[in-house]
Amino acid sequence: MTVRIERRLVSGPAGRIEVALDWPDAPTPVGIAHITHPHPLYGGSLDNKVVSTLARVFSALGWLAVRSNFRGVGGTEGRHDDGRGELDDLMHLIENVAWLPDTVPGSGPARPIALAGFSFGSFVAAQAAVRLKGHGTAVRHLVLVGAAAGKWPMPAVDSQTLVIHGEQDETILLADVFAWARNCEVPVVVIPGTDHFFHHRLPNLKRLVARHVLGAEAEYLRDSA
């Protein structure tokens, strides 16, 4: 599918938020997938290769993928807030959809939501999933890559969450991810010989996420029939 990428600045709780919209080649998106990036103080941004890969997967599957820069990165205003303000900004983008173009039919609360985060972004995305669940909104898909266990207090997530980690990740140790996942009863997909940034393994990552989303969508539709 052809993907059209649009950048825009939208209002947020602490000022403007820079977002990139990866549009699917479809008249009506399946839903809206919000993708969050690595730690902003260590070069993380919405242009990160893992983040861009996640966005391309979702847009190729018919979702509108929304990549947003955290506070202090690119055109996003404000300062890094250790995940608190970053979560507030993400929740703002999810819940206040008036900023989306009129060309997204049915972009209200009923529109399916997916969340995907990489590294520090996984911490923010996981918190958003928990908060949405507390508000009575179910997240259709939650994908956590290089999950930030041991670095930040990762919350317990649904057992259907897709967790992907590199065997040779030296930034976030696999043992810490296993310890967190064990409490959540969440399976962890380990890519052998892979570091934190999935160098030379992005095609593997793309296939894993695509298969998961397609399988979960089929299951969802079957259960809804």
Image (cartoon, grey):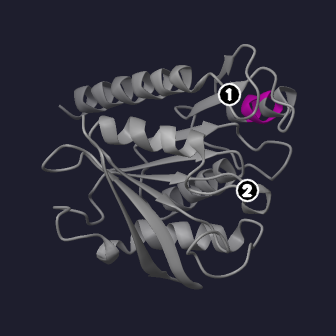
Q: Nearer the viewer, residue 125 or 57?
A: 57
Side of 56 relative to 165 (left or right): left
Majority secondary structure of magenta residues: helix
Q: Where does the magenta region start and end?
A: 178-183
Q: Which residue is mark 2?
A: 43
Quadrant location of the C terminus?
Answer: top left
In terms of sequence position, does the residue under pointer 2 or pointer 1 come before the other?
2
Indicate left or right for 148 with 50 as reference.
right
Q: Residue at x 86, y 43 (%)?
A: 150
Crowding at dot 1, Cα within 10 Å, few <14 / some 14-19 / many 20+, comes out as few
| Residue plotted at (72% across, 61% down) | 40
Q: Which of the pair 91/20 is nearer the observer?
A: 20
> Does the magenta segment cover residue 182?
yes
- Describe the element under mark 1 as helix, strand or loop: loop
* Amino acid of disc 2: Gly
Q: Mark 1 highlights which residue?
A: 199
Q: What number of labels is visible?
A: 2
Tell me residue 207's x, y (percent).
Answer: 46, 21
Please state the horizontal and vertical placement of residue 183, each as a whole percent of the image. 75, 34
Q: Give the left or right position of residue 118, taking residue 212 as reference.
A: right
